[in-house]
Image: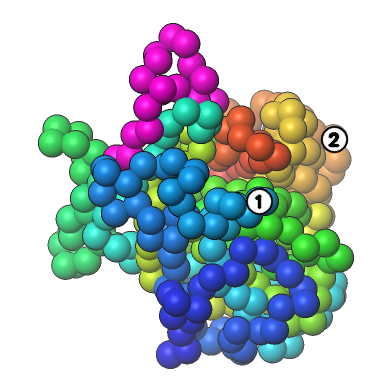
Amino acid sequence: MKRILREQATKFAFDHSDKPLLRVSISEQFEIETWDAGIGFFKSSADKAIPANRPGFDRTPPLVNPIAGPIFIEGLDRGDTLIVNIHEIEVENTSWIAVGPKRGPLGESSRWPELSSEFHTKVFKHTPGASGTTKDGTLHFNDKISWPITPFIGTLGVAPDRDVCNSLDGQGDWGGNLDIRDFKPGNKVFLPVYHEGGLFYLGDVHASQGDTEFTGTAAETQARVRLSFEVIKGSKPPGIRIETPDSIIAVHAYRPLEDAVHQATVFMMEWLIDSYGFTPTDAYCFVSTCPDFRINIYQMCKIGKLNYVAGAEIHKRYLG
């Protein structure tokens, strides 16, 4: 099986001029070994997120959130749809979260001075599950609290049309740093293609995350990801789409949040009309009346240029 090794996964931008790191065929499974968002810096609670101590923080934007790629997919052309099949994610034995002064929305808090005056790093132990691996393992928040590891890919996408976007705050209909918990095993991600071969990138796996990723970091970890691709020739979605075994999700990233929610809902209506036979009137009324219509707020942290990421979700039982 073809593989990108961790030491090769050190790009920090979605750049259409990059030389492909790997070439794969449609339906061919392959693996990517990823760094965590901190490139291995956070190993214990003693490793604080002090910018002066972190390699790459003398750059603007800082060199964090490394990605692997680009991957050239044989048979893809501009105007196609790339379908990413996420088969498996196996995380390493630990993950981390780091907070501190001027980090995240409460990095200047006066109500809780410890958040704005001290740096805190928490390292979480992972224990394997019945499979003997972390694929069904447990994350230990502390001695009393734990939960199942629920890994997903925080940053993925294809090279944008003309821009070069960094892996820290680059976002668009092509992908980017979106921290969508539904980029997980068993699901399909649909992306528009702007360049021959697609030029796909991936990194920033999380072991788990709550809605919004409020601090700006979650359970950041290193991982091994197994993927394959499909293609829809000659058409592309207006934005990112996700298909789970039970539902479909239309995604949009924008500020303010209400604009992200509005456009994700419009994208869902477009999907219902174009692919599932809904009339515009029925689609409009459906999203307002169906009790199972959901808006997922994947990322809503007040950090730098990051947009807010919303997903409009509908269960497949309504789609016929």
Span shown in magenta: 105-123
Q: Residue furthest top?
A: 111
Task: Classify mark 2: helix, strand or loop.
Answer: helix
* 172 or 317: nearer the viewer: 172
Q: Are marks 2 and 1 in contact (CB under 8 Å)?
A: no
Say few, some or many: other residues with alpha carbon within 10 Å of mark 1 (under 14 / 14 to 19 / 20 or more): few
Name the residue that disc number 2 marks.
281
- State the residue at coordinates (36%, 42%): 48
Q: Quadrant of residue 131?
A: bottom left
Name the residue that disc number 1 marks.
61
- State the residue at coordinates (40%, 51%): 220
Does residue 273 appear to the left or right of 222 in the view shown? Answer: right
Question: Is 117 within the magenta?
Answer: yes
Task: Name the kind of residue labelled 1 in the image.
Answer: Pro
Q: Residue 209: tell me if it is visible.
A: no
Task: Name the kind of residue labelled 2 in the image.
Answer: Thr
* 235 or 247: nearer the viewer: 235
- Point out the frontmost of discs 2 and 1: 1
Say few, some or many: other residues with alpha carbon within 10 Å of mark 2 (under 14 / 14 to 19 / 20 or more): few
Query: As displayed, is residue 245 above or below residue 304?
Result: below
Q: Residue 93: tell me if it is visible.
A: yes
